[in-house]
Each structure stands twice: as C-alpha cells, then as structure tokens.
Image (cartoon, coloured by chain):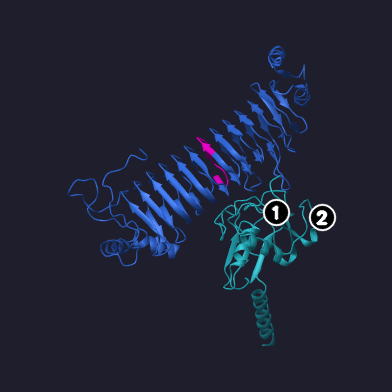
Chain colours: A cyan, B blue
Amino acid sequence: MTRHTAAATALVAVVGLLGCSPSTPSVAWDIDNCDYCRMTVSDRRFGAAAVTNGGRTLHFDSIECLAAWTEAQPKPPRAIFIADASAPGTLLPVAALRFHRTAIGTSPMGKGFVAVAKTAGHTDWDGPALTWDEVRATVSQEGMSTTTPPPSGGH
Amino acid sequence: MLLLAALLAVQGPLLVAPNGPYRSIAAAVAAAPDGGTVRVSAGVWREPMLQLDRPVTVVGDAGAILDGEGTHEIMVIRGAFVTLRGLTFRNTGNSYHEDRAAVHVDSAANCTIEGNHFDNTFFAIYLSRTEGCVVRGNVVAGRPSTESATGNAIHSWGSRNLRIEDNRVGGHRDGIYLEFTRHAAVRRNVSEGNLRYGLHFMYSDSSAYEANTFRRNGSGVAVMYSHVVRMANNHFLANRGATAYGLLLKEITDVTLLGNDFSGNTTGLLADGAERLQATGNRFTANGWAVRLLASTSGGRFTGNDFAGNTFDVAVNARTVDADFSGNWWDNYRGWDLDHDGVGDVPHHPVRLFALLVERAPVALMLQRALFVRILDAAERVVPALTPVQVVDRAPRVSRGRGSE
C-alpha cells in the first residue's frame, strides 16, 4: 500500500514538474511555418518556439517574429525557447541566452537579432549583449514592416 | 583615349595559363589596366580569395574552374564596372558565421555577372549595397542537404536598380532572395528544387517579376512586407508540401498579378494582409486551394481569371472578406447563359461550404468525397447561409479566357 502511495506521489510529482516547466519543444525544420510571418522555419541559427498558456506550441523562424508576437500578447507565454546560434538547431530556454544585434549572417526577417548561450563565452557574433526585454522593446519600436535596412546587417 | 584603346588592342587580354604569361588570376588582375580584360584558360584554379576593386573584365575559356577548396569566398568585387563571364565557381564550403559566397559584390556599382556556372556553393552570388548590377544567364546548382546548411543562389541586400534575368537556379535555401532592394527587374529565370523558396523577397518595393518559372520548391514563393509589386506571366508550379503555396503574399500593398499560371500547388495563392491586390487573367489549375484569402486581406479584385480542376477554388477564414470577383471563368459554374452574351445569368458563389469547414477544422478534409458533404454544398449553393455573401462572381464568364491577352 505504502509502495503504491509512494509511486502515486512520485507520479503526481513528475506530472506536476512537467506542468511547471514545459520540456523543450521540437521544431520540424524546413516544414513548420512561422506562426507570426508564415515563413518556413529553416535557418537553424534563428528558430524559436513558444508554449502558450493554453499549452500550444508555436514556432517562429526568427527572434524578431517571436518578439513581435510576444509583444502582441495580453500576457507572457508559459515558456520561450530560442535557437542557440553557437550550436545551430539547439533550442534553449530564453533565460539561458544572451542576445546580440549582429552584422554576421542575415537573420530571416533582416533585423539581425541572434541568441547565444550565456555559457558560450566569446563568439563571432558581434555587437554589445542585449537582454530579451531590450530585444522586444527594439522590435516593438521599429515595427516589422519597415523597409529601411537596420543599422547593422548584410556585410 | 585613342592611344589607350590602341594600347589595349595591342595588348589584348591578359592570359592566365599554367605556363604563363600569367600563372595566377591574382597576378593577371593586378597587372591589368583599368578597363582591361583577363582571360582564364581551362583548368582548375585554386587561389586565395580574389579582390577586384577597379574596372576589369574576367572571362573564362570553356573549362576554366575557380575552386574555393571548401574554405573561402572566391571573388569579392568592390570596384565599379567589373564583369565576370564564362567562369565556373565551385566549392566555397559552408559557414554558419558568415554569408560566404562564390561571388560577393560589396558596395559596388555596375557589375555584370553573366554566363557563369556555380557548383556546390553556399551562396552563389551575393550582392550587398550595389547599384545597377546585372546578373544574367548564370546556372547555379547547389547540393541540397537535409541539414539545410545552404545559403541562397542569388541574394541581394540593400541594392538598387538590379536586373536578374535568364538564370537557372536550384539546390539552395532560396533560389532568388531580395531584401531591402528596390527597383529590381526579375525576368525569365527558372528557379526549381530549392529547399525553401524559389523566389523570396522582403522589404523590397517597386519591383517587377515577369515570365519566371518557379517549380517544385519546398515552400513555393513568398513575397512579404513590400509595396508596389508587379508579377506578370510567371509560372508557379508543383509546390506540394503540406504547407506549401504557389505564391504567398504577406503584408503587401498594391500588388498586381497578371497572366500568371498557378498549377499543381497545395495552395495556389495565399493572401495574408494584402491590400489592393489586383488579379487579372491568371490561370488557377489543379491546385488543392486555388486562392485562400485571409480576413486581413482587403481591397482584392479578381477579374478575368480561369479556375479549373481545383479541389477548392476560393477559401476564406471568415465570413467577412473584402474581395471583389467579376468576370472569371469557373469550371464548376452550374448556371447557364440563355441570352448568349458570354456571361452566366446567375451569380457564382466560389466558396464551398465545405471549404469553410476545412478552414476551421483541417481534419474534416477526409470527408471531401463524402455524399453528405456534396449535399451540404449543393444546399448552400442554392441558399447561402454560412458562406461569405460578399465573395460572389455576379458576372461569371461561361467560356475560358485567353489568359492575359
């Protein structure tokens, strides 16, 4: 009986934990479409996913799309995961990442935002480090439909 | 001037060959006068990255191959009036840290890149902040991997007055990609078998796309965040992925679609946030969805188009969609033309009830051939209750159009 109780408790604990911290969502690269701009999620350096409060997983081809979508929500999503550009194709929780606005590589929406693992040390991605809040504020301020090139970008 | 011309004529092109007079392209380019020509003989040339920063023409004999040995860009053009013709570029290798290209034009004007071959390159031709360049008659063959470790075949960033004509591109992420580019003319290119888009442009205003063929690309063609776009007589063919479309219009204003072919696509035309879309004389044939209009689209006008053999001719995701249909030919029109004026006597409602159901619950698609779905559709056609009342063709043509004629 106690064994069963223990097992049940463990099960509840596991389920509870899963409920609290969603596991890293997967991205079907080259197949999933961005839930903000509809582009195919393709470039492994820039993809992202958000788990909504309703439990749905949304995919994004770029950090700027994720930021624009997040800004349009009444409250923050349950969890956000973004590709670590220093290990393309690997998603990390947003808290484990630092951000740069880079001239290296063209981000899918052209604004040049890139995320790198905080543990990665120095990488080739240049520019001063930004926080996720700063990235969102910048995207919010610039808007997504500008046809002026960003200050950095291209070569 | 005459003297200079005479000198050039006497000197002729500077020949690069294994036994000289020049044994490397770099040496010949360094020795060439402004406006001079370097001729590269057949053979595989492995040299460090070549910089062209003044007016010079580099032409290749048949079999002249420039090899990046999988490690570097092959040519960087930084001067005006550089011409590359008849060369084969190969093996740049991949890079996650730079947009590595076989030919990289950076802040230069009036370049001509014509009749070259590109084999196994990350980016083939990369134009950054250029003015007045011509990219014509090149053949770009990538080696697509499932890793998607590939750039675009022809890529333009922040450029003006660009002509991209008569190229054949495939095997890259996007065949032709324009970003922050204005006044581009993209004509008669064939872009097929690319991992993502045959043509993709964003933030690129006032450009024209004519007589191109986009076939069997991963997701089709995507046109986004741009104003004043004209697309005429293009072919959008066989883009069949689950989420693929012939042409996606996303946040576009003032777009004209004239005499294009949309055939064999999962979705022919998908408009999301398109304002003032004018579609005339296009042919929509054998698509899953010929036209899908999302509620964010406004001011659409569809006149003189042909719809034949599509599973759904028009689908919308809301009952209120601001689009005007008139004078189109619909193969499933069930009216008649008793006065023989070429126009059907009863209006045609192109949105099937079932299309509306599928838009809300995609799994319902499995009922496509069910009898009761047909009964529902027939009932809805007689008494429209759920389908959008605005989306109606009040003057459907009873005979097929002649495209854009």
**Please, is residue B129 above or below residue A125 in the view?**
above
Relative placement, left or right, of B397 versus B180 is left
> Which residue in the structure is indicated by mark 2?
A122
- Which quarter of the rendered picture does the N terminus of chain B lie within? top right
Image quadrant in which you'd find residue A31: bottom right
**Please, is residue B366 above or below residue B30 in the view?**
below
Q: Secondary structure at mark 1?
A: loop
* Amino acid type of the residue tagged 2 in the rendering: His
At a point 41% along the width and 64% down the height, the residue shown is B318
Image location (x, y in percent) of residue B65: 68, 27
Image location (x, y in percent) of residue A2: 69, 87
Residue B96: in magenta span: no
Label for residue A75?
A: none
Look at discs 2 and 1 and give the one toward the viewer.
2
Q: Which residues are magenta?
A: B185-200
Residue found at the very far left of the displayed protein? B338
Q: Nearer the viewer, residue B152 or B91?
A: B152
Structural crowding at the residue carrying mark 1, measured as other residues with C-alpha within 10 Å and reported as few (<14), some (14–19) or many (≥20)? some
Q: Chain of mark 2?
A: A
Dominant SS in magenta: strand
- Which quarter of the rendered picture does the C terminus of chain B lie within? top left
Q: Earlier in the sequence, mark 2 or mark 1?
A: 1
Label for residue A88?
A: 1
